[in-house]
Amino acid sequence: MENIELFQKAEDYLKIVKQKRDELHFIEEVLEWSSKRLKEKDDLRARFELESSIYYFENNFKSTQKNQSEITKIFEDDPDTLTLYLDKNWRAFEFDRIFKSTDFLYKLMLVGQKLKRKDIRIDKQMTREYVFSESRLYFYLASYEELQIKSIKFASPGFINFSGISEIVKEVKGFIKEILTFEYFRKIIDNFDYYRYKRPIEVHKDKSALKEAILKSEVEIITKKKEKLQAERELKLEKLKAKQTELEYKNQVNADQKKLEIQQLELERQEEIKKIEHEFKKLEFIQNSIDKLKQLSELIIELNNKGIVKGELLEQQIIQTISSIHSLGFEGNKLNLIPIGYDEKKTT
């Protein structure tokens, strides 16, 4: 390899290394701040920052680790297993909700998979009227395909261990993780109620209350937030540029001091850019999550249009499911996908 090519490759990799270093440094600061804040009190913003940073780390850095630690291994269940970890005091109806919610998600996603591969069971000619009107998803599943309960520990902390088809379990696990991570699901619920009661929309062709609620939430969460971040970035950078220009024209400041202050301003500029970019990254994760929810709403519309199950009822069930998991996990801290109170020191 020619020297010039070697140097170019080294420079390219160096840029990537520096970028990753800066990202890790910023995540480190957020993790330290939010962990400390959350230990002092149950702060919603701190928990959101902590969960978002963990989610970002897991998706961008964790997969690159060659030697997995024990704590990583304990969080990774068998591919056909879903474990929900429990904490605090539970009421009877909350247990009922979590079992029904998990089972519903599993059935809906499995029926969606069957629809894609044109399974013989997913056929309008096989559907009974009561199956459609009552949205009985189990009608399209064989008994061996049903979600199973592998083990349960009713305690605080405790767990519920489900098992099922690996591909579907993975989808359900990913969806539950997003409900437990992102605050925006509450807005989806509120917007759905708006389209259900104030401006009713029936599931028909390519429209539904759930789909409209998601699109409305996307504008409120993603579009408006991006515009705000862009404006903030431009304003902050303009202020820093103005400071630098003002400093350069100051004659009373000696050269060394001026150079030092200009360097400090440059560091401030880079720090502001990193903070804004981190916020944009978080929006990317939320956008990916919203896109998956859009696909789910499209699936419900398709199942309704094909006469498989009634769309309006499925929409209500998915909103009830999201609401239950979100309130128990994100808001109540009773539910998680990782062992609650796990001590990393004991495994190393």
Image (cartoon, helix red, strand yellow):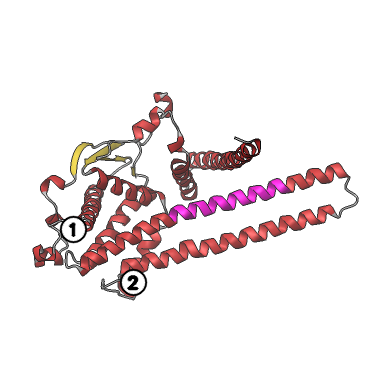
Q: Which residue is mark 2?
A: 195
The local crowd at label 1, few if under 14, some if 14 to 19, many if 20 or more residues have their Cα within 10 Å, is: few
Q: Residues within 10 Å of mark 2 (few under 14, many from 20)?
A: some
**Is 210 a magenta residue?**
no
Indicate left or right for 13 with 81 as reference.
Answer: right
In the rendered view, tell whether residue 74 sits above or below residue 222: above
Residue range (magenta)? 266-286
In front: label 1 or label 2: 1
Assign the magenta stretch its main secondary structure: helix
Q: Quadrant of the C terminus?
A: top left
Q: Amino acid at mark 1?
A: Lys
Q: Nearer the viewer, residue 243 or 199?
A: 243
Q: Label 2 is placed on what type of residue? A: Tyr
Residue identified by numbered label 1: 118
Q: Secondary structure at mark 1?
A: loop
**Marks 1 and 2, the one that precedes in the sequence:** 1
Residue under the image location 78 percent in, 47 percent down? 262
